Image: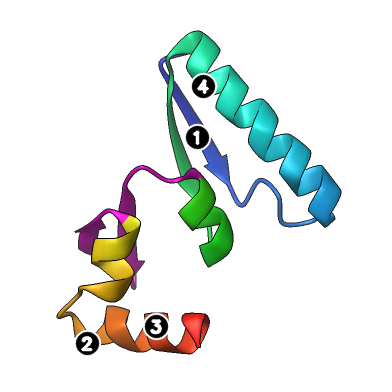
């Protein structure tokens, strides 16, 4: 696998199922050296899994970077408002 695309892969899972999925995904990624692109809205999951985040608004990329940079060191008002709401 060179590229794996996932859209909200754990949405309907309970916590145990999501944790198992995350571990399996990380093992798969390491074993096959594949890039994983996921659409996620669960910020805790983003923090656990993402090396790089692309933040989108209305179908357009507005920021790209690591978790801390994106959510704690941003000067983008939309991202700051979102982070304050989600992380509050």
User: Which of these two is toward me, 1 or 52?
Assistant: 52
User: In x, y percent, where is residue 71?
Assistant: 32, 71
Q: Earlier in the sequence, mark 1 or mark 2?
A: 1
> Are circles 2 and 4 on residues that touch, CB within 8 Å?
no
Give yes or no for residue 62 being in the magenta stretch. Answer: yes
Neighbour tally class for label 2: few under 14, some 14-19, many 20 plus, Cα within 10 Å: few
The residue beneath circle 1 is 5
Span of residues in magenta: 49-66
Which quadrant of the structure image shows residue 35? Answer: top left
Q: Is residue 13 visible?
A: no
Q: Which mark is residue 58?
A: none
Q: Earlier in the sequence, mark 2 or mark 4?
A: 4
Q: CA distance from mark 4 to mark 1?
A: 12 Å
Q: Which mark is residue 77?
A: 2
Foreground mark, 4 or 1, reads 4
Instruction: Label 4: state its secondary structure.
Output: helix
The residue beneath circle 3 is 82
Instruction: Label 3: state its secondary structure.
Output: helix
The residue beneath circle 4 is 29
Q: Earlier in the sequence, mark 3 or mark 1?
A: 1
């Amino acid at each position: 696998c060179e590229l794996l695309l996932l859209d909200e892969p754990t949405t309907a899972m309970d916590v145990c199922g999501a944790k198992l999925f995350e571990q399996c995904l990380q093992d798969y990624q390491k074993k096959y050296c594949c890039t994983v692109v996921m659409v996620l809205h669960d910020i805790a999951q983003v923090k656990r899994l993402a090396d790089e985040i692309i933040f989108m608004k209305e179908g357009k990329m507005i920021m790209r970077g690591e978790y801390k940079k994106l959510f704690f060191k941003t000067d983008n008002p939309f991202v700051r408002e979102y982070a304050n709401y989600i992380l509050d």
